Image: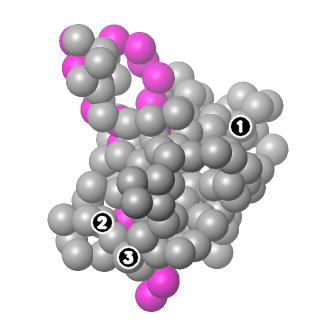
Amino acid sequence: MSQDLVNAAIAASANAYAPYSNFHVGAALLLDDGQIVSGANFENASYGMTLCAETVAIAKANSDGTLRKIVAIAVAGGPAGQVAANDEAITPCGRCRQIIKEVADLTERDIPVHCAHANGYDTYLLSELLPHGFGPANLK
């Protein structure tokens, strides 16, 4: 199932709107019922207003009422037409790691993040990608 999720992230990257960087990113979320929700990055001329693929997919799951069902995430990125062609895996940026942390805390899961590259994918637990993340417990 992990490879299917990675393939869904690669496919989602084709929908990226990245006219400035030409760096296309796709993300796919696996829900606990087997459904896959995907998203692609959406750039903005101001760059700071850009929406990452992971954020788009998570917001989509939230608007569909399935945020609490997320059990795994896959990410694939690279230049248009070359997504997942590099030897090194593309991992979520810091902002996305923090957004994934919110989901992890909400679901009480250490969410696996499958990061695509030319030879397949590497899997990291969110706690490995964001070892000292800020979450709801810090606000108590």
Q: Amino acid at mark 2?
A: Ala
Q: Are marks 2 and 3 in contact (CB under 8 Å)?
A: no
Q: Counting residues from the N terminus, which is met first, the one under dot 1 or under dot 2?
A: 2
Of the pair 76 and 100, the residue shown nearer to us? 100
Depicted 131 relative to depicted 49: above or below: below
Q: Which residue is under mark 1?
A: 89
Residue 71 position within the rendered picture, expressed as x and y whole percent measured from the top left:
53, 73
Label 1 neighbour load within 10 Å: few <14, some 14-19, many 20+? many
**Residue 26 within the segment the image draws in magenta:** yes
Real-space Cα separation, disc 3 to disc 1, in angstroms: 27 Å
Residue under the image location 58 percent in, 73 percent down:
109
Q: Amino acid at mark 3?
A: Arg
Q: What secondary structure is found at the residue carrying circle 2?
A: helix
Span highlighted in magenta in the image: 20-45
Q: Which mark is residue 61?
A: 2
Chosen colour scheme: one colour
Q: Which residue is mark 3?
A: 68
